Image (spheres, grey):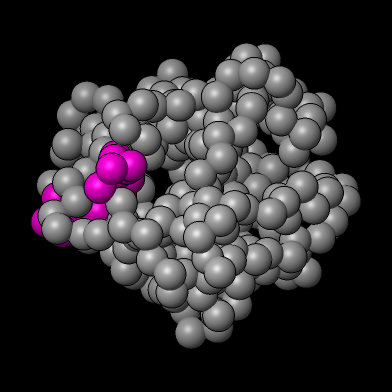
Amino acid sequence: MAPPNSILVIGVALLLTAALTEQTFVNFSYVGVKGPEKWGSLSPYYSTCSKGKSQSPINIVKKDVVYDSKLQPFLRNYTATNVTLINNGFNIGISCGSAVGYANIDGMKYTLKQMHWHSPSEHTINGERFAAELHLVHIASDGSISVVAILFKIGNPDPLLNQMKESLNQLTKETCSGDQEAHVAVSRMKLKRLNKKTRKYFRYVGSLTIPPCYENVTWTVLGKVRDISDEQLKALKAPLDATFKNNSRPVQPLNGRRVQFYNELHSN
């Protein structure tokens, strides 16, 4: 199954830009001739994937991060709301309603618009890759983009995914072809667990991790690695075509960028 034109929704509605259209969209993959190493040559609109100097994901080397006393506590206020579970072809995601809540990042309010999973993780810590990674995509009133990344290791079931067990099973049964994407409504999904206090996080400026790899994205990678069960991981992969079951872009060069580090213990 080729990735549908739902990426246009991400490019236009979610990211508040009209950079992608029916004419500029080009299928991409994670393997073969349309894999990550070739993304930049698939379309002129994807050129940043190969030419950009601030690409994501990255390998975070703990000894090289810089503690920054100017970083503020990472505050968010997400609420229970109706959401839509989506098979985008290249990942499993959730489209959030307008009242889902927001994150306060360095004094700016970012509204949560969408979340999606990658497996295995895209970011690595000291070279270690984890079982999965959840991206929470936020947009500010000025159109700037901020993505929060949560890393997962195999362990206990994740409470957030527990709420979606039946919906994921239903999504797997849906037929997805051409430019059609599969949707399953999820009523009153409780997102309060995502409000849990963050004592440590990493911050850097990077890009989207799928074409067209737009840059100037503020990344917040949470320091605590959470648990996901093996069964849940299989359920996230089940609706995807074989070429997208492992949907992680390789880590990209830092090119002199600085990774900042927030630690609550040292913030006062």
**Above or below 149: residue 109:** below
**Above or below 245: residue 190:** below
Q: Measured from the top left, where is residue 179 in percent x and y?
A: 49, 44
Q: Where is the C terminus found, in terms of image quarters?
A: bottom right
The foreground one among 242 and 260 is 260
Q: Residue at x 75, y 38 (%)?
A: 160
- Quadrant housing residue 165: top right
Q: Where is the N terminus found, in terms of image quarters?
A: top left
**Count of numbered circles on the image:** 0
Q: Residue furthest right?
A: 188
Is residue 208 shown to the viewer in this render?
A: yes
**Above or below 152: residue 65:** below
Q: Measured from the top left, where is residue 186 in percent x and y?
A: 81, 44
In screen coordinates, is 139 left or right of 189?
left
Q: Which residues lie in the magenta part? A: 48-64
Q: Measured from the top left, where is residue 39 in percent x and y?
A: 21, 44
In screen coordinates, is 103 left or right of 124?
right
Q: Measured from the top left, where is residue 46 in percent x and y?
A: 22, 55
In screen coordinates, is 192 left or right of 173?
right
Q: Residue at x 51, y 30 (%)?
A: 132
Is residue 148 shown to the viewer in this render?
A: no
The foreground one among 213 and 129 is 129
The foreground one among 103 and 215 is 103
The foreground one among 150 and 268 is 268
Whether the magenta-drawn stretch holds residue 139 is answered as: no
In screen coordinates, is 41 left or right of 250?
left
Q: Residue at x 47, y 65 (%)?
A: 146
